[in-house]
Amino acid sequence: MFRVRVHKIESIRDLDGNLGKRIELIEERQIPRFVVRPKTEEAKVVQDVLQAVQQQLPIMPMKRQFATPKIILFFTEEECERLGMNFDVNQVYEIILESETIRFKKTV
C-alpha cells in the first residue's frame, strides 16, 4: 500500500479522437529534514532569518515533498462514467496492490 495525490488532470483526445482525461498521480512521500547546527553566531542568525522568511512566504514551503509521477491514467469520458470515480486535484488516495488488482481508497 502507498499513498498518491492527484497532481494534474488534463482534457485530452486519444488516437481515435475521443475526448478523455489524463490523470497524473504522484506519490506522497516526505523528504526527511536534516538539522544542521550552525557553528558560528553569524550562521545561526542567517539560519533564523531564513526560517522566518520561509514561515512568511508561501513560495518557500517548509514541508518538502518528493513529487514524482507514480501512475498516469487515461480514461475516455465513457470510461470515467463507468468507473464511477471523480478524481479531484490534490485528493489523496491509498493504492492497494494485491492479486493482480489495483484498488483506490479515497482518504479523508
Image (tube, rainbow, N blue to C red):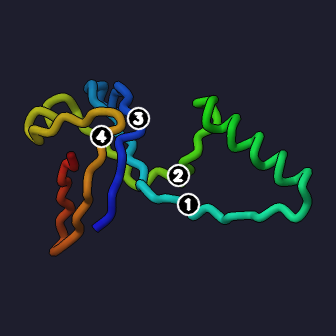
State the separation of the CA atoms marked 2 and 3. 16 Å
Q: Earlier in the sequence, mark 4 or mark 2?
A: 2
CB atoms of marks 3 and 1 within 8 Å: no
Give the residue type that dot 3 points to. Answer: Lys
Image coordinates of residue 13 in percent, x first then y, are 34, 27
Give the residue type that dot 2 points to. Answer: Gln
CB atoms of marks 1 and 2 within 8 Å: yes
> In the rendered image of this protein, does residue 42 appear above or below residue 96?
above
Q: Secondary structure at mark 4?
A: loop
State the separation of the CA atoms marked 1 and 2. 6 Å
> In the rendered image of this protein, does residue 100 appear above or below residue 62?
below
Q: Secondary structure at mark 3?
A: strand
Residue visible at 51% across and 52% down in the picture? 68
Comparing marks 4 and 1, which lies closer to the viewer?
1
State the separation of the CA atoms marked 3 and 1. 21 Å
Give the residue type that dot 1 points to. Answer: Ile
The disc at residue 91 is 4
- In the image shown, does 104 or 55 lie closer to the viewer? 55
State the separation of the CA atoms marked 4 and 2. 15 Å
Image coordinates of residue 63 in percent, x first then y, are 54, 48
Name the residue tied to disc 2.
65
Q: Quadrant of residue 11?
A: top left
Image coordinates of residue 75 in percent, x first then y, are 25, 38
Name the residue tied to disc 1.
31
Give the side of residue 32 with respect to residue 49, left or right. Answer: left
Name the residue tied to disc 3.
8
The disc at residue 108 is none
- In the image shown, does 78 or 24 lie closer to the viewer? 24
Image coordinates of residue 61 in percent, x first then y, are 59, 40
Q: Secondary structure at mark 2?
A: loop
Characterize the local packing of mark 3: few (<14), some (14-19) or many (20 or more) Cα atoms within 10 angstroms.
some
Q: Earlier in the sequence, mark 2 or mark 3?
A: 3
